[in-house]
Amino acid sequence: MAPATDEPLLRVKNLQTHFHVGGMVAKAVSGVTFDVRKGEILGIVGESGSGKSVAALSLIRLIPDPPGKIVGGEVLFGGRDLLKIPHEDVRKVRGREIGMIFQEPMTSLNPVFTVGMQVMEPLIFHYGLSKKEAAERAAEALAKVGIPDATRRLTEYPHQFSGGMRQRVMIAMAMICNPAILIADEPTTALDVTIQAQVLELMIDLQKQREGAAIILITHDLAVVAETCDRVIVMYGGKIQEVATAVELFENPRHPYTLGLLKSIPHGADKGSRLTAIRGNVPSIFDLPEGCKFCTRCPDVMDRCWTAEPELREVSPGHWVRCHLMDEKK
């Protein structure tokens, strides 16, 4: 893991993203605040519907409007608030300074354009390279991510690539401009274990090519987080529930939701025993509890959890938790 500094590359303050559907409002991201530091790998974990991907897409203003809308907050990068600058200026940041590997490579690549055209596009748009120059750079990028006979494969279409190879193409596209921040949204989904390890190793190797570059890794896989991340954000119900270093989170989890996630991981020593599941279901995004968003499933729920939203507060240096239990343990 890369050494991180205290100076943030990106600072997110009170980010709020809502979706308006059928006269109802879904608060997918509700007051999220965090920093991305130079050189770090920041993990964001949580169940489906917790707001991880929406938060990431909001950073570079890729929320479809309508039905979605970023209704508040700041995303400070390079001395500017990305939520307030013109769309043309945001386009100049996307790909060049902040790259993104999207969640589903099977559908994120355009089926009617060759892989080469899609990998070349950021170079032509951001740097004004000729098609010949861009093609040479694109072939180099594909070769770096382990695609054999890269020059020939530039002329092929996405359907001619396997799932793992498409994921590699997505990484090449996201990294070809050597961005300061790479957002990787479930980059190993639907890949076998061997390819998963290769993809993660590839991302980290490419990160090292730019001094101080950072990765935001969004995943369900806590084993991947333990292996690769420096700090971890745990999200639930559109809010951050816990933040800590990876070591601290796994050794001393404090939020009941984090504990539930960790207990649900299979352990070799428990062979033959039943997995511990978090009881109940994730509440509808249109009908979240008034108080703590986890209160409907929490084994330690108290009366005030139903009506009062706990604050995210620091319980030890660098370890933040949003839970009323932290008040009880003062």
Image (cartoon, rainbow, N blue to C red):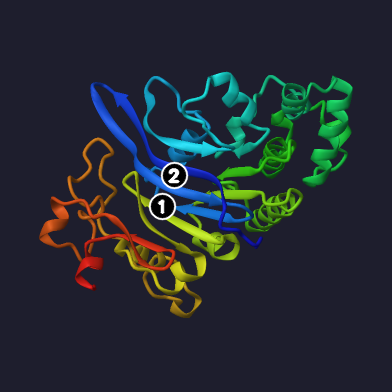
Residue bearing the label numbered 1:
46
Foreground of the two, 136 or 278: 136
User: Residue at image x 85%, y 35%?
Assistant: 139
| Tag count | 2
Q: Which mark is residue 52?
A: 2
Q: Please say whether residue 164 is visible from this viewpoint.
A: yes
Q: Is residue 277 left or right of residue 226?
A: left
Give x and y (percent) for residue 43: 51, 54
In the figure, 78 relative to 116: above or below? below
In the figure, 252 relative to 65: above or below? below
Q: In the displayed orientation, state which residue is furthest to the front.
A: 79
Q: Amino acid at mark 1?
A: Gly
Foreground of the two, 48 or 213: 213
User: Residue at image x 69%, y 54%?
Assistant: 204
The quarter of the picture where the C terminus appears is bottom left
Q: Amino acid at mark 2?
A: Lys
